[in-house]
Image: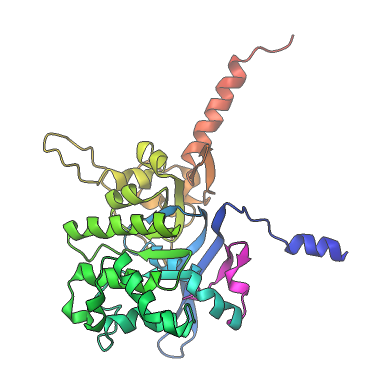
Amino acid sequence: MSNANNTKKAVATNPENLLEVRHLKKYFPIRSTFIRRIIGNVKAVDDISFTIKRGTTMGLVGESGCGKSTAGRTLLRLYPKTEGEVYFNGKDIFKLSKSELRKFRPKIQIIFQDPYSSLSPRLPVGEIIGEAVREHNIVPPEEFDDYITRVMKACGLQEYHKDRYPHEFSGGQRQRICIARALALNPEFIVCDEPVSALDVSIQAQIINLLKSLQKQFNLTYLFISHDLSVVEHISDTVGVMYLGSMVEFAPTEKVFANPLHPYTKALFSAIPVPDPDFKMKRIILEGSIPSPANPPSGCKFHTRCKECMEICKTVDPALKEIEPGHFCACHLYDVIKAVSDKKDSETSPTDK
């Protein structure tokens, strides 16, 4: 009996994957203003699953408010989960005790979107980068100064920058400080939460190239959250597309960009600007506004804006299925196509008489 229970508790994880997210949910309660009673939930992340292999980058894309940043922060335990599991090196992050989590923290880091507000204006750069290094005893005290210098130089900063304050730096340099602060803890996994969206286009390329260079040098694994699809195509190995808290498509980058399957993904990709004045892009215009995550539509959440909408879409929530090898999509359209294909195959196949 005990063996059977142990078998149920044991969860098999693929050793190739650094991170495995399974059915993760994060709901924020809505409270009435008068008696503070919970009257509903904002379903910011609503049952998403994905994996990230070691040393690779997964891009997470979608419209503003779709739950990308909440997903990234929840899987780092910056927010408590509502449901689901997050396995890092085969261990469930949410089952770690406080002491275990403290030891584990340096391995998982985040680079925030806004380099202006994510740095303390009262601390010099050397202290900003080294504060957590000292707290977690990453290096012995006698090696501390040299270690911070090495980390800063790896991120394109100079040693004399240590004594300066954040307000003395440009946006691109501040983001390098944020990257150095994360890198200093010798992490394995970094959530990049729109790290270039607040920067000029010319600086964006420098930061993206820096992130790619550091990934090769230190064998880092990234979750790269962005709404800029051209940046995601450049840096990512796999791409997940979110809509209203749900994952609607997940595949290797080249497959998603060469052959987007979900109607929402097709609409997103049709909006990518092309640097050719003579090229006529066939834009897919989505009608209507995004439904509220506090009151999402029944069935497929995208059906209220989808031109391919069928009756089943209005009542049945589609599961994320493998449509082609490695390419997952949550859409009833492919169930219908498969059913028609199977029917044709059965009609054309020879029958025994």
Magenta stretch: give its range: 77-98
Q: Position of residue 165 (x, y in %)?
A: 22, 83
Query: Within the image, what quadrant is residue 155 found in?
Result: bottom left
Does the magenta-highlighted stretch encompass residue 94? yes
Residue at image position (45%, 69%) is 186
Q: Which image quadrant: the N terminus?
A: bottom right
Q: Position of residue 140 (x, y in %)?
A: 47, 81
Q: In the rendered view, tell whether residue 144 sits above or below residue 174.
A: below
User: In this view, which residue lies farthest toward the front?
Assistant: 142
User: In this view, which residue lies farthest toward the left?
Assistant: 277
Q: Nearer the viewer, residue 17 or 230?
A: 17
Q: Nearer the viewer, residue 308 or 187?
A: 187
Q: Position of residue 270 (x, y in %)?
A: 27, 43
User: In this view, which residue lies farthest toward the right?
Assistant: 1
Q: Nearer the viewer, residue 265 or 233?
A: 233
Residue at image position (58%, 24%) is 343
Residue at image position (27%, 78%) is 117
Residue at image position (36%, 80%) is 145
Q: Is residue 91 left or right of residue 250?
A: right
Q: Is residue 297 in sight in this rendering?
A: no
Q: Which image quadrant: the C terminus?
A: top right
Q: Nearer the viewer, residue 152 or 117?
A: 152
Q: Is residue 101 in sight in this rendering?
A: yes
Q: In the rendered view, tell whether residue 150 sits above or below residue 220.
A: below
User: In this view, which residue lies farthest toward the top?
Assistant: 353
Q: In the rendered view, tell whether residue 105 sits above or below residue 65.
A: below
Q: Is residue 10 left or right of residue 218?
A: right
